[in-house]
């Protein structure tokens, strides 16, 4: 039987980050990935002959700076600067689009002067408040049972951040923290296009509408992330998200990590309450002192371990993690670039959002509560081949769209519902980019159910578990076990289902590795 210091289950970006961080300390680390390539939901793949795209995640906006530094990703070819930041475009069916340029709207165009100054004030406030949450992303949530000296120091830092706000801002921060995003937007802005865009951003990847309590947290989560050193910046990576994975993988391999693909783990071997190894579907077994599971927490405990090794209370908590996704992915191969109404060339290279008002987003959300898809879905579109022509044949174009709301548990079933949902999505696209339908050479629509099967993401969920107030921080993945360790000694969690959540950040993987290193003294 082969043995390692550490086995990482899952070669998604978090698994690779955890593995690289551990291997850099001289440990022998093995990554086991079920699929035939690493990257999880952050891969670039060919979806039609000659057309490649980021199959699922397509925008980089929260790769954690500690990950970039620890893995020396710049040395491995991942370097971004201001010129790579793409604007957000709030599309309009019949008028000019409104655009947020730079790092999340340093400059707003297409709106009235009054709206521009209202946005300037709101943007500064949002970034200030999101900044308070930032230090929490790169460390364990505080252990409420006994705060260690180190944790006390980091909590102190966050408290200092709050204090720096000043009395009035601090009061306002606490007032708005758990508000719904629609109410906050109504307090401060007028333009429904801008409000629609922000309402979309706050709810993307979650089972919330803009009027759901706490929906504003989603906007803070987004703005606590950064790209190229700027909070709120977003990048459509050249080569697709797979290029980010290639850099992370190169760093892991340079540190000595062994990677095995096409190796699904079917069991975590537990002896006397301690994880000592894993078994593959071939029956092969491998041993290690430490196992990091960088896959979904429910899969880890309910399928790879099973109830015999864990107490019923913990099993119940894991079963209760909500993780039914609402986001679908549409990848279109087009024979020519589409023309969105009221958008210039810069806008077409940006992130085009169909969410014409907060009410529209709310109405799109409503059916999903009852297991139905939205007849007028909201979506975020990129045209990655405009900046990177290698992704499509000459003159052709790739359109990549994340579409909401498409509930995982569709009442009529996705076999029946998928063609109807595709029609609804295409009709919506056609309304904003007339003629796009006629240029489609191939369409790939992945519902949350497809994403679950193809990428082994239960519920097809963006965060491997809803990222709402009751499933965040000390309650992520379940209350009492938020610090990457688990009831099984030697087993740690390190995927998006753990704090701070999903998105291509690498933070859960990095934090998990740091926890393992701290445990070993
Ligand atoms: C529709 C959609 C759009 C999104 N868009 C964006 C976006 O634009 N930007 C962004 O930042 N984020 C986006 N996300 C979120 C992002 O994709 C995820 O949060 C992120 O990929 C999670 O990374 P991970 O490494 O934790 O898990 P994953 O990416 O899920 O990787 C887990 C890996 O583990 C492997 N695995 C699973 N089970 C086993 C097993 N038993 N044995 C071995 N290996 C196993 C899987 O094959 C997979 O490779 C999107 C998500 C969705 C659903």
Image (cartoon, rainbow, N blue to C red):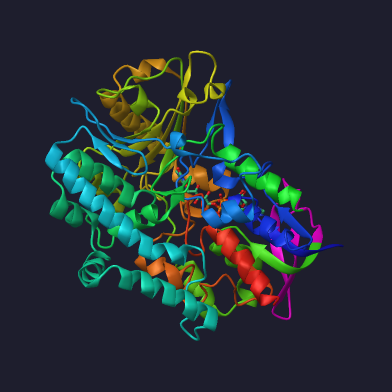
Outermost residue, right side: 1
Residue 76 in sight here:
yes
Give x and y (percent) for residue 117.
17, 45
Q: Nearer the viewer, residue 331 or 389?
A: 389
Say which quadrant the C terminus sits in: bottom right
Residue beneath the point at 31% across and 32% down: 424
Q: Nearer the viewer, residue 460 or 41?
A: 41
Vertical arrangement, residue 491 with respect to residue 260, above or below: below
Say which quadrant the N terminus sits in: bottom right
Q: Quadrant of residue 22?
A: bottom right
Vertical arrangement, residue 143 with respect to residue 293, above or below: below
Marker count (numbered): 0
Give x and y (percent) for residue 177.
27, 65
Give x and y (percent) for residue 211.
21, 55
Q: Nearer the viewer, residue 446 or 495?
A: 495
Q: Is residue 476 left or right of residue 296?
A: left
Magenta stretch contains residue 39:
no
Give, as a single range, the part of the protein colored magenta.
256-285
Task: Name the chief secondary structure element in magenta.
Answer: strand
Magenta stretch contains residue 279:
yes
Q: Quadrant of residue 351?
A: top left
Q: Nearer the viewer, residue 481 or 320?
A: 481
Q: Is residue 4 left or right of residue 65?
A: right
Q: Is residue 164 left or right of residue 264?
A: left
Residue beneath the point at 47% across and 63% down: 137
Q: Is residue 255 left or right of residue 45?
A: right
Give x and y (percent) for residue 140.
52, 71
């Amino acid at each position: 039987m082969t043995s390692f210091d550490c086995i990482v289950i899952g070669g998604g970006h978090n698994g690779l980050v955890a593995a690289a961080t551990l291997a850099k300390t001289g440990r022998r680390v093995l990554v086991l990935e079920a699929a035939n390539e690493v990257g999880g939901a952050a891969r670039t793949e060919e979806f039609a002959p000659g057309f490649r795209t980021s199959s699922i995640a397509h925008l980089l906006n929260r790769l954690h700076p500690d990950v970039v530094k620890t893995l020396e990703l710049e040395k491995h070819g991942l370097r971004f600067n201001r010129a790579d930041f793409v604007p957000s475009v709030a599309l309009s069916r019949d008028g000019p689009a409104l655009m947020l340029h730079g790092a999340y709207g340093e400059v707003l165009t297409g709106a009235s002067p009054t709206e521009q100054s209202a946005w300037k004030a709101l943007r500064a406030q949002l970034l200030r408040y999101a900044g308070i949450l930032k230090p929490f992303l790169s460390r364990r949530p505080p252990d409420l049972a006994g705060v260690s000296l180190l944790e006390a120091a980091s909590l102190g830092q966050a408290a200092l951040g709050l204090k720096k706000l000043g009395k009035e801002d601090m009061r306002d921060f606490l007032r708005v923290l758990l508000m719904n995003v629609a109410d906050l937007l109504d307090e401060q802005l007028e333009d429904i296009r801008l409000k629609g865009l922000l309402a979309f951003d706050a709810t993307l990847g979650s089972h919330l509408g803009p009027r759901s309590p706490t929906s504003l947290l989603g906007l803070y989560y987004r703005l606590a992330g950064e790209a190229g050193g700027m909070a709120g910046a977003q990048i459509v990576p050249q080569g697709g998200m797979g290029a980010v994975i290639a850099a992370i993988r190169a760093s892991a391999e340079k540190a000595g990590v062994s990677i095995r693909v096409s190796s699904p783990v079917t069991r975590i071997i537990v002896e006397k309450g301690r994880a000592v190894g894993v078994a593959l579907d071939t029956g092969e077994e491998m041993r290690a002192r430490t196992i990091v599971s960088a896959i979904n927490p429910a899969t880890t405990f309910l399928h790879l371990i099973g109830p015999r090794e864990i107490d019923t209370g913990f099993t119940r908590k894991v079963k209760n993690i909500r993780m039914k996704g609402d986001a679908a992915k549409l990848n279109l191969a087009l024979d020519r670039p589409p023309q969105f109404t009221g958008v210039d060339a810069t806008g077409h290279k940006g992130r085009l959002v169909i969410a014409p008002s907060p009410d529209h987003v709310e109405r799109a959300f409503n059916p999903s509560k009852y297991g139905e898809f939205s007849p007028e879905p909201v979506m975020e579109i990129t045209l990655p081949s405009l900046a990177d022509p290698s992704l499509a044949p000459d003159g052709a174009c790739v359109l990549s769209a994340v579409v909401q709301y498409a509930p995982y548990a569709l009442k009529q079933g996705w076999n029946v519902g998928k063609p109807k949902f595709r029609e609804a999505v295409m009709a919506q696209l056609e309304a904003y980019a007339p003629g796009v339908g006629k240029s489609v050479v191939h369409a790939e629509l992945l519902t949350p159910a497809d994403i679950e099967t193809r990428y082994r993401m239960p519920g097809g969920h963006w965060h491997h578990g809803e990222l709402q107030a009751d499933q965040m921080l000390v309650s992520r993945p379940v209350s009492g076990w938020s610090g990457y360790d688990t009831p099984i000694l030697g087993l740690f969690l390190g995927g998006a289902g753990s704090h701070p959540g999903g998105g291509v950040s690498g933070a859960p993987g990095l934090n998990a590795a740091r926890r393992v290193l701290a445990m070993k003294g």
